[in-house]
């Protein structure tokens, strides 16, 4: 098959990391992630393995790097009608720790192109690229990135007048799985539940199967009181997803219980959202099936005072 012929061909040309692995980026990363693991500081520091891709980033100005074969493959899929794209998953392997001073090089190949698959989104092909990150001759890690190039499914058969009334597509649904089902069950009952380790009492969010403080597998929940502050935020202008109305503010909210979670900030114009601003939990009903926790800021006058 024509698409299979792209397997093994370069997806990006070999490049060197913009900066050597360095303590400043490691420190910023750890601060942003709230990761206080002692392995990442001090004279024998290593970089957090999850930073692997950070060392390959080209910055906001971007740099040409995509190989011809990869563009050609995506072009073929576009021409065949598989014009939509969604990133599906990312997988990293760590083979050797990176330390300040290490200079990395990386390249990327089209590792596989799947058979044609039917998915909930539509029919298409999964394209997996694999980036290998080296320090000198040593392979330090690999980063696999999978996308689905697909033809969107036509909207389900609503009658035309109904469809005209409801031009706006539904907001995407949260992905509910075994680990976070309890959280969404809480939201359904208008309760914001935080997981608590029953071994050491550490609260955690997002929901996980184990405690990152002590490793304990057992947990119960506490209900958030609903007070929080904006720890950080972004204002989304682009891209214009049709289920949303940009611009809108998305906050990383620090709950008074200490954990942080992401949610829309409502109640003030999005350019008035500020770090440190107090916010209060609300449950917003987006449609018949979708309720999400959102955060309401005080009135604009108070907010700028
Ligand atoms: Zn614990």
Image (cartoon, helix red, strand yellow):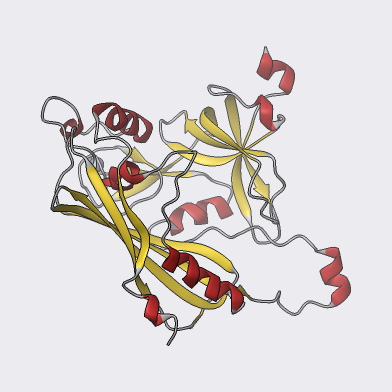
- On-image quarter of the C terminus: top right
Residue at the (18%, 33%) spot, across then down: 101
Residue that protrudes farthest toward the bottom in the picture: 1
**Does residue 135 lie above or below 131 as drawn?**
above
Q: Is residue 61 visible?
A: yes
The percent coordinates of residue 244 (x first, y second) are: 69, 51
The percent coordinates of residue 250 (x first, y second) are: 58, 39
Ligand 1's quadrant is top left
Question: Where is residue 8, by image quadrant?
Answer: bottom left
Question: Where is residue 123, by image quadrant?
Answer: bottom right
Please tell me which residue lies in front, 217 or 157: 157
Residue at the (17%, 37%) spot, across then down: 99
Q: Is residue 234 left or right of residue 129?
A: right
- On-image quarter of the N terminus: bottom left
Please tell me which residue lies in front, 177 or 150: 150
Please tell me which residue lies in front, 298 or 135: 135
Q: Is residue 265 left or right of residue 197?
A: right
Q: Is residue 297 left or right of residue 107?
A: right
The percent coordinates of residue 284 (x first, y second) are: 67, 46
**Does residue 88 lie above or below 56 as drawn?**
below
Please tell me which residue lies in front, 80 or 68: 68
**Does residue 157 lie above or below 174 as drawn?**
below
Q: Is residue 284 left or right of residue 19?
A: right
Residue at the (20%, 51%) spot, across then down: 134
The percent coordinates of residue 42 (x first, y second) are: 15, 25
Residue at the (51%, 55%) spot, across then down: 184
């Amino acid at each position: 098959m024509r698409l299979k012929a792209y397997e093994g061909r370069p997806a990006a040309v070999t490049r060197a990391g913009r900066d050597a692995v360095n303590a400043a980026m490691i420190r910023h990363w750890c601060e942003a992630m709230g990761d206080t693991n002692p392995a990442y500081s001090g004279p024998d520091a290593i970089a957090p393995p999850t930073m692997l891709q950070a060392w390959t980033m080209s910055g906001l100005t971007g740099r040409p790097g995509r190989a011809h074969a990869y563009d050609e493959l995506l072009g073929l899929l576009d021409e065949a009608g598989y014009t939509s794209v969604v990133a599906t998953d990312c997988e990293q392997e760590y083979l050797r720790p990176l330390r300040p001073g290490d200079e990395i090089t990386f390249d990327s190949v089209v590792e596989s192109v799947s058979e044609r698959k039917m998915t909930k989104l539509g029919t298409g092909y999964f394209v997996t690229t694999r980036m290998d990150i080296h320090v000198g001759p040593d392979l330090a890690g690999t980063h696999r990135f999978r996308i689905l190039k697909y033809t969107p499914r036509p909207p389900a058969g609503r009658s035309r007048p109904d469809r005209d009334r409801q031009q706006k597509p539904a907001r995407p649904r949260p992905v509910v799985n075994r680990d976070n089902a309890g959280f969404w069950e809480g939201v359904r009952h208008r309760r914001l539940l935080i997981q608590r380790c029953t071994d050491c009492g550490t609260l955690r969010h997002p929901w996980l199967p184990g405690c990152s403080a002590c490793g304990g597998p057992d947990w119960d929940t506490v209900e958030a009181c609903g007070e929080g502050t904006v720890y950080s935020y972004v204002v989304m202008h682009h891209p214009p997803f049709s289920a949303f109305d940009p611009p809108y503010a998305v906050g990383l909210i620090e709950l008074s219980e200490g954990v942080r979670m992401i949610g829309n900030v409502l109640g003030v114009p999005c350019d008035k959202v500020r770090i440190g601003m107090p916010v209060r939990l609300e449950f917003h009903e987006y449609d018949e099936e979708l309720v999400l926790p959102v955060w309401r800021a005080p009135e604009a006058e108070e907010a700028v005072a």
